[in-house]
Image (spheres, rainbow, N blue to C red):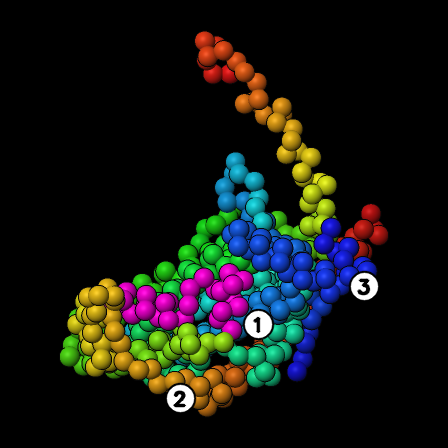
Amino acid sequence: MQIKFVKYPRFIAMGEVQLEKRFQDYLDGENKIEPKDWMPDAYRKTLIRQISQHAHSEVVGMLPEANWISRAPSLRRKVALLAKVQDEAGHGLYLYSAAETLGIDRSELVDDLLSGKAKYSSIFNYPTVSWADMGAIGWLVDGAAIANQVMLCRTSYGPYARAMVRICKEESFHQRQGYEIMLSLANGTAEQKQMAQDALNRWWWPSLMMFGPTDDLSPNSAQSMKWKIKRKSNDELRQEFIDKTVPQAEFLGLTVPDKDLKWNEEKQGYDYGEIDWEEFYNVVKGNGPCNKQRLADRVKAHEAGAWVREAANAYAAKEAKRKADKGQAA
Amino acid sequence: MDKPNDNWKIWEVFIRSKNGLSHKHVGSLHAPDADMAIKNARDVYTRRSEGISIWVVPSEAVTASSPDEKEPLFTPADDKVYRHPTFYEIPSEIGHM
C-alpha cells in the first residue's frame, strides 16, 4: 500500500509527507516498528548510527577489563570477570545483528570502528590502573549503562528493543559483581578501602558523562524522543542514576567526589555539581587518556584473529567438499 | 585490512528452551556454514541455559510476507467473529462448554 507512492515519482513529495505522518501516528500509538516496515530515512540512519555505536562500545568495553583477567585476585573473581567480558562480546553481536536488520552490512560497521571513523562510548578511553577499577566499572559504568538500557527496552524499533531485553537481563550480574568487589575492598584493610575510594574518585564523573550532554545542549535528543527511540532525556537518566547510586556509596562508607552533592527534599533527588564538559568533548574528539591505545588494541585483536576466520572458511570448504564427494559416491 | 569474513552468511537462530515448547526465534549471527552456525549460536544465545535445542536457518532461505500486504492478508479475519466460541449463546444451565 505505502510503496505505491514510490512507484509514481509525481507523488513522491506528497507521499513522503503522508507516510511520515502515518509513521508518527503509529509510533504515538506505542506501536513497534519492525525491519520490513516503512520508515523515514532519517529514522533508519539514526538507528544504524546509535545501534552500531552501542555495539562498538560493547566490543571496545572488553579491553579495559580484559587488562585485569590474568591478575584477578582469586579464581572466583577471575571466572566472573571472564564471564562478564564474554557477555560483552555477546552483547556486541546482538547489537550488530539488530543493526543489520536495517540493511547495513556488519563488515562495514566493523571497518568504520577499526578505521577510527565510528564512535563508541568515551568511558572506555579511561585507563584501568588498579583492581578496584573492576569494581568501580561494574558498579558505576554498568550501572549507568543499565539505566540507559532499561529505557531502551521500550525503544520503538523492535529488534533493538529485543536485544536490549536480553542485555539487561545479563547486565544485572555485571553490576552486582562490581559492587561486590567494592564491598570487599571497602571492608578490607585501610589500604584496600583507599583503593576503592580512589577508583570511585576517578570513575564517578566519567560515569555521569556517559548520559551525554545536558538536555539544552543535546540537539538530536528531541527528534529521538519524538520517534520514541529515546524514552527519557539525558538529564532525567543522569538524575535517576545519581539518586540510586549515592546511597550505595554511603553503604560502602565511601565519599562521592562532589562537594556540591546534596539531597534536595523538594525535588526528592540529589543536587550535584557542575560536570566538566570540556573534558567530555576532549575525550569524544579522541584526546582521552586511552583513545589511541584502545583503537590500536582493537585493530591488533582483529588482525590477530584473521587466522581463525581463515581456518573457519577452510573447514567449511573442506566439509562442503566432503559432503559433495559422499553424495557422488552414493 | 583483511576481510576474510565478508562472505559469511547470516543465519537466523531458533532456540527450544525445553522439551514441550516450540523453537523460538532469538536473533541472528554470521557463520561460514551450518555446523559452525550451531556452535556460534550455542556461545552467543545459550550462555545461561536458555536452550536444549538449536535450529539455524540461512536468512536468505526465509520468505516473509510483506508489510504492504498486511491489510489484504490479515484484516479479513477481523470481521469473522463467528469463528470464536464467544459468538454462540449457550444457556448458563449448560455450564462450561
Task: Say which quarter of the image contains residue A12.
Answer: bottom right
The span from disc 2 to disc 3 (Cα, nearest Å) is 49 Å
Verify whether residue A30 appears in magenta.
no
| Left-right relation of A233 to A132 | right
Mark positioned earlier in the residue sequence (2 or 1): 1
Task: Say which quarter of the image contains residue B84.
Answer: top right
- In the displayed structure, B7 sits above or below A214; it is above
| Element marked by disc 3 | helix
Name the residue at 61% across, 49% down.
Answer: B55
Name the residue at 54% across, 23% down.
Answer: B86
Q: Chain of mark 1?
A: A
Tell me where residue B77 appears, x and y as whole percent: 66, 33
| Element marked by disc 2 | helix
Compare residues A319 and B92 and report the one nearer the observer. B92
The span from disc 1 to disc 3 (Cα, nearest Å) is 31 Å
Residue found at the very far top of the displayed protein: B93
Residue pointed to by mark 3: A10
Residue pointed to by mark 2: A278
Q: Chain of mark 2?
A: A
Which residues lie in the magenta part? A220-246
Let me know if residue B44 appears in the view.
no
Q: Which mark is residue A49?
A: 1
Let me know if residue A11 appears in the view.
yes
Name the residue at 81% across, 60% down.
Answer: A8
Amino acid of disc 2: Glu
Q: Chain of mark 3?
A: A
Say if labels 2 and 3 share a chain: yes
| Left-right relation of A31 to A267 | right
Tell me where residue A277 appears, x and y as whole percent: 39, 85
